[in-house]
Amino acid sequence: MYIKSLTLKNFRNYETQSLTFDKATNVFQGNNAQGKTNLLEALYLFSMGKSFRTNQDSDLIRFGESYTKAELRFCDRNREHVLEIIILRDKKKQIKINGLTISRLSELVGHLNVVLFYPEELGLVKEGPHIRRRFMDVALSQLRPGYYHTLGRYQRVVDQRNKLIKKIRMSGGNSLSDTMFVWNEKLAELGMTLMQYREEFMQRLGVLAQKAHFEASGETLTLVYKPRFETKEAFLEKLETGFDRELEQGYTLYGPHREDFEIFINDKEAKTFGSQGQQRSAVLSLKLAQADLLFEEYGEYPVLLLDDIMSELDQTRRAYLAGKIPDKQVFITCTELDALLHRGKIFTVSGGKAAMQE
Ligand SMILES: Nc1ncnc2c1ncn2[C@@H]1O[C@H](COP(=O)(O)OP(=O)(O)OP(=O)(O)O)[C@@H](O)[C@H]1O
Ligand SMILES: [Mg+2]
């Protein structure tokens, strides 16, 4: 699939901007703080319905303005689609797909698929489990709309259950109430579904990531995911035997919201033993695998959003990447134009304005 055009009104540092894109490579070049990442953020917004940089939609509204509005046109193999997003301060954002307003974000996710790579994502290898969980959640939501839906329900159960744990704690009780049994049942039920999705996903992703990584670097990348529980019974049992600890801590301790996966390069844990560059290319391999998996599933390659990636990779890995992307649509930001990037459309970004270079 590819994005045809983007129109922005009061988005971040853009006042009004209209851009028509190349079907393959699009480069946003400019100095720091000019609005390059803001453009990727706008594109990403149409994929997941939210920013990758903030949970606060109103951050996207240009300083001093009361609303922002963005429109994006993209083509999948069937037809052209128009997506529209309007964000007002302190109001629920409005999203339209082909002119029709949707009522839940889950209706948007899965239409425009993008895979994003940005510098902070080095954390995917280095940082705590929540970043890897978010990676699984975002990638799986695009791949399987059912996952996104189940995840939302699961999170609500965790919230409810946490409230109940706090209530039992406050009242000085220590036994599992009937209501708690009901929540346990729901938690285990939905949790098992999520873990099954993750198991299948990580299996397939692991194969593709290993392939991409080997081609890029000659190293062996291995992803290891083990569901926290094999069966629903085991899950339920832990919720009973571990309840004292939950009461002590005050929240739900067991389930997919606490999971993680491990990343190995040549059989050594990448988190501890990987160099900066190795970690970086491991993240890239994961991202490319995420895109390959979407292709395997839908027969359509997602749009790649690559923020500042060239400065982050060595020559071999850059060349590998450049060789991998020609027939796909990519958006790349950079401060300096790389010889590898002299193709497609190049936009110069300066002070919240993007102009195509002739
Ligand atoms: N809501 C907003 N309204 C107006 N300007 C904003 C808003 N949010 C961010 N900005 C401005 O956008 C600029 C940053 O844009 P962006 O992150 O796209 O920069 P960049 O070109 O990617 O820079 P770098 O090369 O450093 O990554 C900052 O100067 C910031 O002040
Ligand atoms: Mg940037």
Image: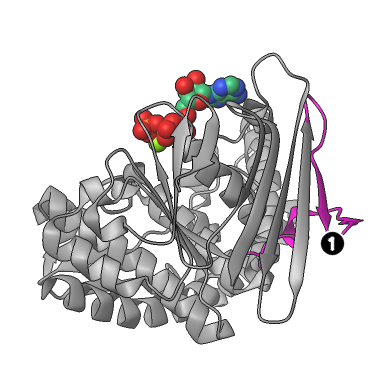
Q: Quadrant of ligand 2?
A: top left
Q: Is residue 191 visible?
A: no
Residue at (10%, 52%) from the top-left corner?
275
Under mark 1, the amino acid is: Asn
Q: Secondary structure at mark 1?
A: loop
As drawn, 15 above or below 322: above
Classify 204 as above or below 341.
below
Callout count? 1
Classify residue 307 as left or right of residue 257.
left
Q: Position of residue 318 (x, y in %)?
A: 21, 61
The stretch of residues the image draws in magenta is 88-112
Quarter of the picture containing the N terminus is: bottom right
Q: Position of residue 2 (x, y in %)?
A: 58, 67
Residue 97 on the magenta span = yes
Q: Is residue 17 above or below residue 203?
A: above
Left or right: where 214 falls relative to 197: left
Residue closest to the eye, 239 or 110: 110
Q: Nearer the viewer, residue 102 or 182?
A: 102
Q: Position of residue 249 (x, y in %)?
A: 48, 37
Q: Residue at x 70, y 64 (%)?
A: 149
| Residue 264 image-quadrant placement | bottom left
Main secondary structure type of the part rendered in magenta: loop
Residue at the image point whose x is 18% and y is 77% from the top: 214
Splitting the image into 4 quarters, where does residue 191 fall? bottom right
Tell me residue 314's x, y (percent): 13, 55
Colour mapping: one colour
Q: Which residue is mark 1?
A: 98
Q: Is residue 11 visible?
A: yes
Question: Outermost residue toward the right?
Answer: 100
Q: Is residue 101 found inside the magenta-colored segment of the image?
A: yes
